[in-house]
C-alpha cells in the first residue's frame, strides 16, 4: 500500500469539526463525509462464497518447503464471511486497518494513487457466523490510514486534501469521533499536524499518539486533543505504546523506543530500509515488540532494551511472483498467536509463546495477496487491498459440563486424513482441523473439531462431537454423509458450511440440552433417516 506524498506548505495545526447528512437525527452534517446506517443495504456486500473451515498448510522449518503430508493442526479457523471493498463514484476503496472491541470491529479505508477518498465502517460481530455492517462513513476528501478504538471514541490517522478543505492546514491529521452501539454519535473532528499523511495512531489512558509520514512527526495529544509534545523523525510508518513507553517505526531510521512522559529516547532498533511508501505495522505485546520488516519477515524484540529475541522469515516463496510482492506488510499477535501478512506469500501463523523459538504453524489457505492482518479477541481480519476483507473466527472449545467420557483424553497428533476402521475405537480432545474423515467404528472428539473437505460416517459407525464442530466449505463440493445404520451425535455448537446428507437408516442425534446448529449448505434427508434430541436450527433446514 503506497502512502500519498504531496508537497504542501507547512503551517500551524488547528481544529476542524466536519461531517455530513441532512438527517436531523444524525450528528454528521458536513458534505465531505457521507454517512450510511442502512445495515441491510450495507451488509448485502458481505458474501458467504468460499466460507467455511480453513486449512493450514504446514511448513518444514528446516527447508521452508510444504510437507508431503499435512499434520493435523492444533488450530481451528473458520472463514465466516468475505467483504468486498466499498466503492464510491467508480473508485474502489482499500482496507487499511482494523481494530476490534467487544461486539464491534472498526475498519478503515483509503484509495490508492492521488485521489483522496477513504472511509470507516463498523461491523457487528456479536454473532460470529453472521457479521453485519452497521455503519459507514465515506470521506470524499480524505484517506484513512489507520484507526484505534478507545473508551467510546475512534481515533483516525488521516490524509486530508487541503485544496478541498477550507480549514485543514496540513494533509496529516488526527481524526476523532464518538461511537456507541455501532453508530457515529458525534461530529468528526480533525487536528492538523506537520506531514504529508497521518500513517498510524495509538492511544493510552493519558494521550493519543499520531505519526505522520515523509517529513513528519510523532505528535502527542492530551484527552482534550491539545498537542503536548512532538518528536520529529522522517518516514514514520507505525506507532504503539504501553502507557509508559512509545515505540515508533521509521522506514529509513528504524525503531525508536521513547519515554512517554518526555519523549526521551530509551533505546533503538536498527532495521533494514523499507520500500518507499509501503505500509508496515508494529505491536507491543507481553514486553515484546513485534515488527513487520518487509522482505525480512517479522522481528521480535525486547521492549525493555530493543534487543533481538528472534526473527521469523516468510515461509514460502511462490513462483511467478515479483520479489517485491513477497513482503511482510503487517503483524498481529494475540493469545500467543502471531499472524503475518506476507503479500503474495499469504498469511503465515506462528506460536510465539516461547520467547526463543517461535513455532511456525504454517500458511493459511486463503486466496489473494495479504496486505494487512488483525488478530484480536478470537477474530482474524485479513485485508487483501482492493479485494476487501476476509473475516475469520478462531473456533474455541465450548464452555460447559464435560462428560466423564471426555476426561483424560489425549490430543490428536495424527495425519489430517483420518480413518477409523469398523473394528476400531478412537477418542481425542483439544482443538484440531482435519481434511477428510471416514468413520467405520467408534470415534469421539471433545473440544473444538473442524473438518475441511469431507466426512463419511459409514454403516454401523458412530461419531460423537462434544463441544464446537465446524464442517466443510460453502459451495465447494464438501459433503457430510451419514449412511445407513450410522449415527452422528452432536453436543454443543455446530456449523455446517458444506452439504449434509442423511441417508436411509441414518441417525442424527443431539445429546443433552441447549444444542445449536447452523447449516448453510444443502440438506438431504432420505426416507427412514432420524433426527432426535434437543436442538435449535436457525436456518430451518432440518424441519
Image (cartoon, rainbow, N blue to C red):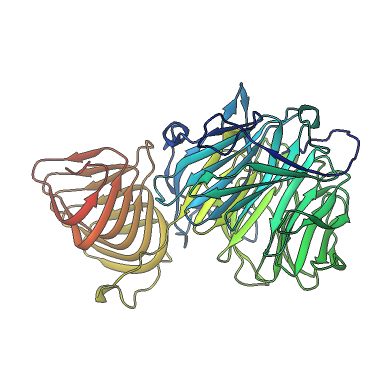
| Residue 125, percent from left and from top | 45, 49
Residue 424 visible to an observer of this rendering: yes
Whether 252 is drawn above or below 24: the answer is below
Name which residue lies at 89% across and 45% down: 215
Name the residue furthest front.
24
Please state which of residues 235 and 418 is positioned toward the viewer in this rendering: 235
Please state which of residues 226 and 4 is positioned toward the viewer in this rendering: 226
Which of the 4 image quadrants contains residue 355? bottom right
Name which residue lies at 36% across and 46% down: 472
Residue 367 visible to an observer of this rendering: no
| Number of residue marks | 0
| Horizontal arrangement in the rendering, residue 61 relative to residue 543 (left or right) | right
| Horizontal arrangement in the rendering, residue 294 relative to residue 59 (left or right) | right
| Residue 370, percent from left and from top | 62, 43
Give the position of the C terminus as an image quadrant: top left
Please state which of residues 337 and 310 is positioned toward the viewer in this rendering: 337
Name which residue lies at 34% across and 74% down: 409
Which of the 4 image quadrants contains residue 219? bottom right
| Residue 364, percent from left and from top | 54, 50
Give the position of the N terminus as an image quadrant: top right
| Residue 378, percent from left and from top | 49, 58
Name the residue furthest top.
90
Whether 540 is drawn above or below 140: the answer is below
Amino acid at each position: 500500500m503506497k502512502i500519498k506524498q504531496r508537497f504542501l506548505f507547512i503551517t500551524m495545526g488547528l481544529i476542524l469539526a466536519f461531517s455530513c447528512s441532512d438527517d436531523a437525527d444524525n450528528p454528521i452534517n458536513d458534505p465531505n463525509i457521507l454517512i450510511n446506517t442502512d445495515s441491510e443495504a450495507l451488509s448485502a456486500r458481505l458474501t458467504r462464497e468460499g466460507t467455511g473451515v480453513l486449512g493450514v498448510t504446514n511448513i518444514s522449518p528446516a527447508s521452508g518447503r510444504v510437507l508431503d503430508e499435512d499434520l493435523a493442526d492444533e488450530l481451528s479457523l473458520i472463514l465466516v464471511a468475505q467483504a468486498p471493498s466499498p466503492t464510491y463514484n467508480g473508485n474502489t476503496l482499500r482496507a487499511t486497518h482494523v481494530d476490534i472491541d467487544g461486539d464491534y470491529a472498526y475498519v478503515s479505508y483509503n484509495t490508492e494513487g492521488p485521489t483522496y477518498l477513504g472511509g470507516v465502517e463498523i461491523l457487528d460481530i456479536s454473532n460470529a457466523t453472521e457479521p453485519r455492517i452497521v455503519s459507514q462513513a465515506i470521506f470524499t476528501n480524505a484517506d484513512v490510514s489507520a484507526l484505534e478504538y478507545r473508551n467510546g471514541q475512534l481515533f483516525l490517522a488521516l490524509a486530508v486534501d487541503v485544496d478541498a478543505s477550507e480549514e485543514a492546514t496540513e494533509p496529516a491529521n488526527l481524526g476523532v469521533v464518538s461511537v456507541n452501539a455501532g453508530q457515529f454519535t458525534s461530529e468528526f473532528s480533525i487536528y492538523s499536524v506537520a506531514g504529508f499523511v497521518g500513517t498510524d495512531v495509538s492511544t493510552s489512558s493519558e494521550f493519543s499518539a499520531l505519526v505522520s509520514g515523509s517529513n513528519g512527526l510523532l505528535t502527542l495529544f492530551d484527552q482534550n486533543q491539545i498537542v503536548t509534545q512532538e518528536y520529529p523523525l522522517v518516514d514514520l510508518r507505525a506507532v504503539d505504546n504501553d502507557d509508559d513507553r512509545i515505540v515508533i517505526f521509521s522506514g529509513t531510521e528504524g525503531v525508536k523506543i521513547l519515554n512517554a512522559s518526555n519523549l526521551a529516547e530509551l533505546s533503538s532498533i536498527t532495521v533494514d530500509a523499507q520500500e518507499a511508501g509501503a505500509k508496515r505495522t508494529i505491536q507491543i505485546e507481553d514486553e515484546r515488540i513485534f515488527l513487520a520488516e518487509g522482505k525480512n519477515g517479522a522481528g521480535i524484540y525486547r521492549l525493555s532494551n530493543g534487543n533481538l529475541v528472534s526473527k521469523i522469515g516468510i515461509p514460502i516463496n511462490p513462483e511467478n511472483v515479483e520479489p517485491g510482492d513477497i513482503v511482510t506488510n503487517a503483524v498481529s499477535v494475540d493469545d500467543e498467536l502471531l499472524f503475518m501478512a506476507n503479500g503474495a506469500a499469504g498469511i503465515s501463523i506462528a506460536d510465539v509463546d516461547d520467547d526463543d523459538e517461535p513455532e511456525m504453524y504454517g500458511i493459511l489457505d486463503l486466496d489473494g495477496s495479504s496486505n494487512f492482518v488483525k488478530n484480536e479477541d478470537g477474530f482474524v481480519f485479513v485485508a487483501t487491498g482492493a479485494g476487501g476483507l476476509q473475516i475469520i473466527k478462531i473456533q474455541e472449545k465450548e464452555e460447559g459440563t464435560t462428560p466423564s467420557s471426555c476426561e483424560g483424553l489425549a490430543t490428536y497428533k495424527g495425519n489430517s486424513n483420518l480413518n477409523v476402521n469398523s473394528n476400531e475405537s478412537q477418542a481425542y480432545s483439544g482443538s484440531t482441523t482435519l481434511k477428510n474423515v471416514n468413520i467405520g467404528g467408534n470415534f469421539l472428539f471433545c473440544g473444538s473439531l473442524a473438518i475441511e473437505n469431507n466426512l463419511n460416517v459409514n454403516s454401523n459407525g458412530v461419531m460423537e462431537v462434544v463441544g464446537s464442530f465446524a464442517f466443510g466449505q460453502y459451495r465447494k463440493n464438501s459433503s457430510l454423509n451419514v449412511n445407513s445404520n450410522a449415527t452422528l451425535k452432536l453436543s454443543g455448537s455446530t456449523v455446517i458450511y458444506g452439504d449434509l446428507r442423511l441417508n436411509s437408516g441414518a441417525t442424527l442425534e443431539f445429546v443433552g440440552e441447549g444444542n445449536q446448529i447452523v447449516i448453510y449448505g444443502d440438506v438431504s434427508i432420505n426416507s427412514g433417516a432420524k433426527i432426535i434430541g434437543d436442538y435449535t436450527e436457525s436456518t430451518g433446514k432440518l424441519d
